[in-house]
Amino acid sequence: MFRKNCWYVAAWDHEVTEEPLARTLLCKPVVLYRTEDGTAVALEDRCCHRALPLSMGKVVGDNLQCGYHGLEFDQSGACIKIPGQKRIPPGAVVKSYPLIERWKWLWIWMGDPERADESLIPNWWWFDHPDWEVVKGKYLKLDCNYELITDNLLDLSHLAYVHLNTLGTGDISEFPIKTDREEELVRMTRWIIDRPAPPMFQALGNFRGTVDRWQIVETFSPCLTQIRAGACDAGICDPEDGEPEAGMHIRNLNAPTPETENSTYYFFGHARDFALGDEEVSADLFKMVSQTFDEDVEVLEAQQKMLESEPDRGFIDINVDAPGIAARRMLRRDIEAEQH
Amino acid sequence: MFRKNCWYVAAWDHEVTEEPLARTLLCKPVVLYRTEDGTAVALEDRCCHRALPLSMGKVVGDNLQCGYHGLEFDQSGACIKIPGQKRIPPGAVVKSYPLIERWKWLWIWMGDPERADESLIPNWWWFDHPDWEVVKGKYLKLDCNYELITDNLLDLSHLAYVHLNTLGTGDISEFPIKTDREEELVRMTRWIIDRPAPPMFQALGNFRGTVDRWQIVETFSPCLTQIRAGACDAGICDPEDGEPEAGMHIRNLNAPTPETENSTYYFFGHARDFALGDEEVSADLFKMVSQTFDEDVEVLEAQQKMLESEPDRGFIDINVDAPGIAARRMLRRDIEAEQH
Amino acid sequence: MFRKNCWYVAAWDHEVTEEPLARTLLCKPVVLYRTEDGTAVALEDRCCHRALPLSMGKVVGDNLQCGYHGLEFDQSGACIKIPGQKRIPPGAVVKSYPLIERWKWLWIWMGDPERADESLIPNWWWFDHPDWEVVKGKYLKLDCNYELITDNLLDLSHLAYVHLNTLGTGDISEFPIKTDREEELVRMTRWIIDRPAPPMFQALGNFRGTVDRWQIVETFSPCLTQIRAGACDAGICDPEDGEPEAGMHIRNLNAPTPETENSTYYFFGHARDFALGDEEVSADLFKMVSQTFDEDVEVLEAQQKMLESEPDRGFIDINVDAPGIAARRMLRRDIEAEQH
């Protein structure tokens, strides 16, 4: 059902503290906490003794103490203390998950720990670089399958319908998309040529007239999606050359993590290379993006309900579905590969 | 499970506007809206593209536009526009349901559209005639199977127990009922002879003394029930002759429509041939009927829960169950006939 | 799933009045009421006619009248009146359950009525004796299996973790427990030797210095648990002799009754042999016990959820689990014996 040997975002960095945090990821109960030196730890959120969630206990030094009978577990998940007895029974251990803190997120590896490979975390360096201003988004909890979010991000033609009141863009579907299928990613590219800039770009961009805009959406298996978007004065660059250095640039980073097959934690944020340090712009962008994503929630959850009510019915595909279909194929391939 | 080739009430006429209205009928998602000339339309409430409920979109001219990617569907359910592409794929269509506006209600045919026959809509002309004053009821959403409502209406002996505080009638079960089983309807008739009139009848009826009252309840398959009730001066008519012209007359029209097997939209209203134009009487009747039906809801939902908890247990039947049992047999016959 | 030929607490005595009370016990709907002379009656809460819960009706004299069509049932469950007809159909009867009022509780026998034996009700005489001051607890409705409550009561080592803020006891797990397995009960005994008395004991006990404390927890199948607890001046008695007469004594009586496999009514109260008649002490104890049990609810419901999410996973046992494991074995034995 899920790809397991890969990284998912478990939490924002600021969410994990010395207070244990419970989160169900890929149908597994996980507890997150920090040791005294700040290291973030992810353990199975189920005491091996009588199954109480360890997140109901407390952090004692570097260890996690169960809130029912006081058993303590270290960062490796080993039980290292049982009140009232000296002998620790063999098997008194909870699962420990590899956890890496990077790009303001905590990345968890739910599969075989032996195969956890840091280099597979996407290179989202914009979230940790002085030339880029980061707006940490919130996270959303959605009652939908995580692949619906990938579909949504890879088909921005929905902006004109779902986000009519927030993003205020006209219909961009007149500009065709290009789909690239690489081994480990799917890319959707759309250029909107010679049009007025949307209001915020206009206000901050100092453009002479109309602009050329781009949306380059790239999804990595299982479901990590980076959107490179931006605008520059119309006619000064050639779309064939890819994203230009000129103009304004935004990076939307999206990390949906399945809670269950039908519910998802959706982490997102963005970075920009303009209005650096301008907190008002940051606040405006945070508000706009949040409202936009709230609109998506309504659509995605309604879609999920409908899909569940008649799970065997097929779909009619249209042109803009090509990237989403390609991303689903890539993920199916990877899930099947894991199962063999 | 349901009879399909028949008319059900989908909505009150005033409920359907140029804002799409979602309603699940017989387990199917349906969206209702009006075209520019006021024609009411019923389509499947599921976009054939990615399954978003079309009711989340908007009416554009005579068509319905999906709120996710902007596909448009006409009254026949055919997709007639896909943003960004000219070719409409074969199969880009949603189901369209025959819908007739009559007697202040919108009647939908959920089965084979070829067999939709307007003449099968019951002749509830009192709802559209100057000699009758109509009080449109509200509709109730009940968590119970629709046949429990038919049982309830065909056995008014419950008035003395369920509606003791609202209708205030004494026990009418001392007056026996008569059950008629015709090909297409079941009729329960009860005459309450030579008793004081209930308060509202007394206030409006100008009776000399006691009255004879009648309740003639007729259920048509699958579950449409009309109640003809009234009162006249005691002794002036012969119950053998059926409902007399003398006295006061009320028509209660009841149209429960299954949402699912365990939940029901219950539409009801009534017409009277006295106090025409008297809005105070109308308001009083509306209030009384609403309170009465709210009491029924409590009973019917509790009954449903109990039935679900032990679905295989049988019942003990009593005399007054005869009409309800006959109506259930009639419906079973019709459902089985549809399946062969 | 449940042991049936045994007594369970159905309600506190004061809960059952001439207003019918609905309660689901061992997955069966039960209605409780009192006749005119105060006798408590337990009937099946489902009218044999059309399945309405009889608890929605009303008590008429010594009988229960259904709130839908007015059928009346006597204390034996026999239908003795049907409005509008003289003949009572054979089979017009609802189940009647043996019900005994004792020790402020109503004890119900859900199994074969022929085998109901009053002598099997536990001898909890402290709840009805002038030398003991009773504090009737409330009852809790828990979303957990009833055996988790027995586990909880038989392993008081959780006091130091779950009830750190209420009972304020330090870790008692340094004092070992003793487990006795008798034919019809499991006993856990723990003596806490030569320690300061907890605050309330200190305030009321007039102790010279440190105290010896005892916790003697006895569980009878299926799930009745009495806790004898107390304290006396340190060193004046020999734990080998069992509970001493000296000092202060408390009796905690616990009667969880399964509503379903995953939900439980938990009745509890306690008696003490000190501060007799002191209402302030009673109020303090009621408050403390209530807060303590609320803390247990949180733990037990979280445990239940986790167990349901992975029902086939095993546990690691530790020393203090011995009594709980023994009680589970005793109950399994008794359930299996009933099924053969």
Image: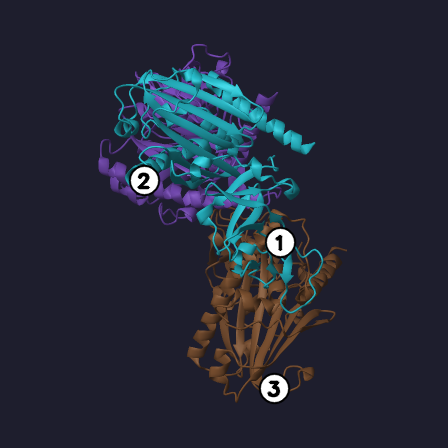
Chain colours: A brown, B cyan, C purple
Q: Amino acid at mark 1?
A: Gly
Callouts 1 and 2 close, C-beta under 8 Å? no
* Quadrant of the frame with the C terminus of chain B: top right
Q: Amino acid at mark 3?
A: Glu
Residue C231 visible from this viewpoint = no
Pointer 1 chain? B
Q: Name the disc covering residue A279, or none.
A: none
Binning the other alpha carbons within 10 Å of mark 2 as few (below 14), some (14 to 19) or many (20 upward) gives few
Q: Nearer the viewer, mark 1 or mark 2?
A: 2
Q: Amino acid at mark 2?
A: Gly
**Residue wearing tag 1:** B77
A151 with respect to A55 (left or right): right
User: Where is A271 relative to B326, above or below?
Assistant: below
Point out residue A153 in the picture as x, y percentages from the top left corner.
Answer: 60, 67
**Residue wearing tag 2:** B277
Q: Tell me the distance, in whole angstroms, between the alpha carbons under discs 1 and 2.
A: 42 Å
Binning the other alpha carbons within 10 Å of mark 3 as few (below 14), some (14 to 19) or many (20 upward) gives few
Pointer 2 chain? B
Q: Nearer the viewer, mark 1 or mark 3?
A: 1
**Residue wearing tag 3:** A245
Where disc 1 sits, the SS reads: loop
User: Where is B120 relative to C113, above or below?
Assistant: below
* Quadrant of the frame with the N terminus of chain B: top right
Pointer 3 chain? A
A32 with respect to B94 (left or right): left
